[in-house]
Every structure is written in structure tokens, then in C-alpha cells.
Image (spheres, rainbow, N blue to C red):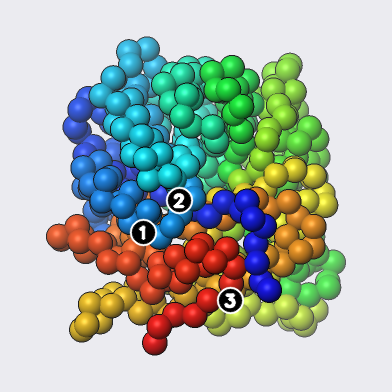
Amino acid sequence: MRQFPHDFVWGVATSSYQIEGAVDEDGRGESIWDRFSATPGKIADGTSGEVACDHYHRWREDVELMRWMGLKAYRFSIAWPRILPLGRGRVNPAGLDFYSRLVDGLLEARIEPVVTLYHWDLPQVLQDQGGWASRDTVGAFVEYADIVSQKLGDRVKRWITHNEPWCISVLGYANGEHAPGIKDWSQALAAAHHTLLSHGQAVPVIRSNVRDAEVGITLNLVPAEPASPSLEDLDACRSFDGGFNRWYLDPLYGRGYPKDVVADHVAAGRLKSDVLPFVREGDLADMATPIDFLGVNYYNRAVLRSDRIPESQNAPRTVHVSDDKTDMDWEVYASGLTRLLVRLHQDYAPGRLYVTENGAAYATGPDADGRVRDTKRVHYLRTHLEASLEAIQQGVPLHGYFAWSLMDNFEWAWGYQKRFGMVYVDYATQKRIPKDSAHLYRAVVAQNGLDVELAA
């Protein structure tokens, strides 16, 4: 029997800017994504999250969809500019009330609310003062976390401080692909540090406001392997794993920053020396504040080939990337999820783990009969759930799985060109249509296992 533990948490995930819309309603302030999306050339299709899925007005319909799917939990994020339009100071009651109504609606549907405090929509006014590259943003985040956890903490027990610090820092401040669109590695490294520091300082604040709180953080992690056994490929793999995974994991688990990656940054000219200018006394202890769980976002693996020697001088490739890819051009590699979860359990012993995002972009739309036969996503979902179960059978304390995403939405720099949802959204009419993947997930949740079939 391919059954999951009886108390396994089945959920879906979304984020505020990607689904809510209503960017200038009820006192919401401007976010960095509002500004970034309004900048010509930043979003592939020239769109924004101004309307998105109109979840701000249609949340009841979306909760009903989740109830129909039988979900146990819903991971959503709070829009910081709805709560504190100026980043800190004056609270906007209408913003808090929106999330309070959403939480009540979820609880009425017997769906546990799981709150992510930060999923990238920083108030623009804070960015104007330096954003995550500024240490002042740490205190602003802790203030924000305090306000939200006081308001919702009587009903919300599971809290995630940040979603994907790698994306916040590298995509936002190093290569400029995401808001705020800065290309400066010194700012990116400071942003990563301040994000993790604000996490560590917010954890005890949330706990003080929420009885029996479970507090964690979500990292996007990519298992890496060398393309060949050559020393050059092995070093490329070490460097990638260090910069993408260990740079964030090691400080969270009391190891400080990995020295080999510090040396990589110095060699690349990103740091002047191995003395990190943004680290102050007590920071590393704060960053390593014990947490109750680690959230893991998994989408693909990385196969590393050295660029330091010509291809002709390197060893023949022994690991090849599959041609099976999603619309994001990401390899479909389900066993990488098992590997990643086992590695985290063995190397970091984080205790409770959740897959907080896992999903695939495919453009499949409704057929003539109105059914969305997203066969590739169905296969993706099945194989990654099998990989999750395999990790559990290998002793990993995996306690839940949140599919990305409930519905098609604004996919950041791609605009509306990429569809990750298990529910199809017609953006012109806002009609929602559950795809075959939603029907499959509903059956999996109902049986708490994988021995389910879809109607032809």
C-alpha cells in the first residue's frame, strides 16, 4: 500500500502578489513588484499583478475550491504593503481585516491556514531606503511580523517567515531578474544576510504572540551533481551547492557561512576579503534561532559542467539532463526530491520537514468539452508524490506537501505566460476550471495514498 502517514498535511500554496490583485484598494501601499512591473521591459508580457486572479474579491470562491479538493491546509502569504503601507509605523486595519476574514473562512471550511509573512512584496518605501541590503529592514520586518502574528495568532499556528531567501537576494539584487531589479553582488550578499537575520529575530516574537506556534522558513533548494567525475566538474558542483544551498542552510543551523563559498565570492570579486562587512556580533546566533520545521521548495536539479576548462579537455559526461522539461525549461527529475530530503535529514537534522512548494508549468488549456487534460502535470504530481513517500520510507520526517499552485497566476518576470496551477484561470473572465491534476490531487488527499486513478 502506498499510503502516507495518517496525520500527513495535504495542502496547496499561493502568494499574495501573484493572485490577489486589488493593488490600490483599501489602503494598500505600493510594493517593489508594483514598481518593477510598471517598468518597461521587466515583465515578459508587459503585465502586472494589478488584477491577477482577483483573489482579493473572489477568495470565498477559492476557499470553496480548496474545500472541494479536500485540502487540509492552505499556505498563503501576507502582502506587507496591505498591513503597513509605509513599511512600518501606521497600521492599515483594512489590510489586517482582509486576512482575518480569509483565515475565518478557511477555518469554517476545516482548512488550516499556514501563513508566509514575506513572499517578495516589500513595501516600495522601504526599498527607497535601501531594501534588504539595508540593516534597517530587519527591524521593519520584525515589527511587521509582530503586528500580523498578534492579529492572527489566535487562529493561525503555523508560520513561515520568508519564502526563498536565495530568490530575494540573488534574483532581486545580484542579477536583477526580479524586483527591485538591482545588479550588485555586494547588495545581494547583504540582502541574504539581512533576510536570514530578520527571520531569526522574528521567530521569538511570533512565538511570544502565538500559543503553541510552529515557526519555520522556506528555502528553495536544488540538489546538484557533477556532469562527470572530473575534478573540475566536482568543484563546479561544490561551488553551486555552496552558493545556492549551503549559504542559506548553514547559518540557519548554527554553522555560520561556509568558508569555501566565502572564498569563492572573494575570488569572484564579490567580497574584498573573508571578513563579511554586514555581519555584526550576535548576528550568527540570531540567525540560528531554533525553528520547528524547514519548508522545502523543489522544482529541479542542477547538473554542473565546469566552464574553467575547454569542453574538449574535460572528462566525458556521465550525467545527462533529461529532455523531459516543463515550460520553464526545468528538467523533470522527481528522484531529486527524494535525494534532497534525505540529504537535509542526514546533514542538518532539521526535524520536521514540509514540501512547501512543488509543481510544474504547462500551458494546457480547456479542450472543446471544457476539460483541462493536463496529462504532463498529472504525471509530474504522481512522480513527485512517489518521491516524497520514498523519502518518508527512508526515515525522513516529512510531515506535509503543498502543491504549487492552487491556480494559474502571475508568474513574476514571466507575467501570465507560465501556468503552474491545478486550477485553470481564464484571466479575461476569472472563471476557474479544475484541471485533471486537481482531480488527481483530490483523490490522493481523500485516500491519503497514491493508488488512485483518473477517469479517461
Which residue bears the numbered disc 3? Answer: 451
Residue 66 locus on image (x, y percent) = 38, 54
Amino acid type of the residue that numbered disc 2 sits on in the rendered structure: Ala
Q: Is residue 230 above or below residue 262?
A: below
Q: Residues within 10 Å of mark 3 (few under 14, many from 20)?
A: few
Q: Residue at x 41, y 49 (%)?
A: 14
Q: Which element carries disc 2, helix, strand or loop?
A: strand
Q: Which element carries disc 1, helix, strand or loop?
A: helix
The numbered disc on residue 68 is 1
Which residue bears the numbered disc 2? Answer: 13
Q: In this orientation, does residue 185 appear?
A: no
Q: Is residue 39 above or below residue 130?
A: below
Q: Is residue 449 left or right of residue 226?
A: left
Residue 143 locus on image (x, y percent) = 48, 17
Sequence order check: which comes first, mark 3 or mark 1?
1
Quarter of the picture containing the N terminus is: bottom right
Q: Is residue 139 left or right of residue 304?
A: left
